[in-house]
Image (spheres, helix red, strand yellow):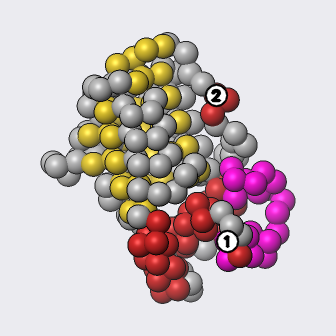
Amino acid sequence: MKDIITYIRSDYHRYYGGGYNTSLLKIILTALIAKNHCFAYSFWLRLCMRKNPFYIIARLKHYRLSRLYCVQIPPTAKIGYGFYIGHGIGIVINPGTKIGNNCNISQFLNIGSNKGTPATIGDNVYIGPSVCIVEDVKIGDNATIGAGAVVTRDIPAGTTAAGIPAKIISNHSHPEYIQNKWQIN
């Protein structure tokens, strides 16, 4: 349960800052009554990733929010610390996807695979709106994927890619898109 709380604190920190010292009660109340459905979704997703005393309630809340906002992120996806959903609507992620620490995703994201080998996304990655990531591609650390891109090949670390199919348009990353990074001790 301790590691689940650390994941939840890291997500809270990315949305609101101060996740290191914020009381657990405040984080829970934020998930229950805040207007930000993206954090609430992330909160319940983290709670239903592993068996814990709140597993049944978490699964029901996760299912309800998934249906309400058309967000399909299965609990089997491996998601690192500081996960940030920019605009939580129309997101579909394959169950075997691996997402690193401090990643931002936006609306209408699709990470899929026909062959059962989905993408691996590195740390500090920003993925813009309406992006499709297809099959077994690797997106390196500190990469930026522009809006509307269709990623069919690997994207190296520290680059910006955009277009259909996605091509590297800059060898410069954009750290300003990743706010309130969670520092892993």
Q: Position of residue 99 (x, y in %)?
A: 45, 46
| Residue 108 appears anywhere in the view | yes
For mark 1, does the 10 Å Cα neighbourhood hold few (<14), some (14 to 19), or many (20 or more) residues?
many
Q: Which residues are magenta?
A: 12-32
Q: Secondary structure at mark 2?
A: helix
Q: Position of residue 95 (x, y in %)?
A: 32, 59
- Residue located at (48% from left, 20% from top): 159
Residue 44 in magenta stretch: no
Q: Position of residue 101 (x, y in %)?
A: 56, 44
| Residue 4 appears anywhere in the view | no
181 sits to left or right of 18: left
User: In terms of sequence position, does the residue under pointer 1 or pointer 2 come before the other?
Assistant: 1
- Residue located at (60% from left, 73% from top): 1
Q: Secondary structure at mark 1?
A: helix
**Which of the two residues, 134 or 36, is positioned nearer the viewer here?**
36
Q: Position of residue 39 (x, y in %)?
A: 62, 62
8 sits to left or right of 148: right
Q: Amino acid at mark 2?
A: Pro
17 sits to left or right of 135: right
**Which of the two residues, 113 or 71, is positioned nearer the viewer here?**
71
- Residue located at (47% from left, 66% from top): 69
**Which of the two residues, 145 or 11, is positioned nearer the viewer here?**
145
116 sits to left or right of 72: left
- Between the C-alphas of marks 1 and 2, the distance is 27 Å
Disc number for residue 22: none
Q: Do the residues bearing badges 1 and 2 touch, measured as CB atoms within 8 Å?
A: no
From the image, give the main secondary structure of the stretch colored magenta.
helix
Disc number for residue 31: 1
- Residue beneath label 2, please? 175
Q: Amino acid at mark 1?
A: Ala
Query: Is the residue 106 above or below the residue 90 in the image?
Result: above
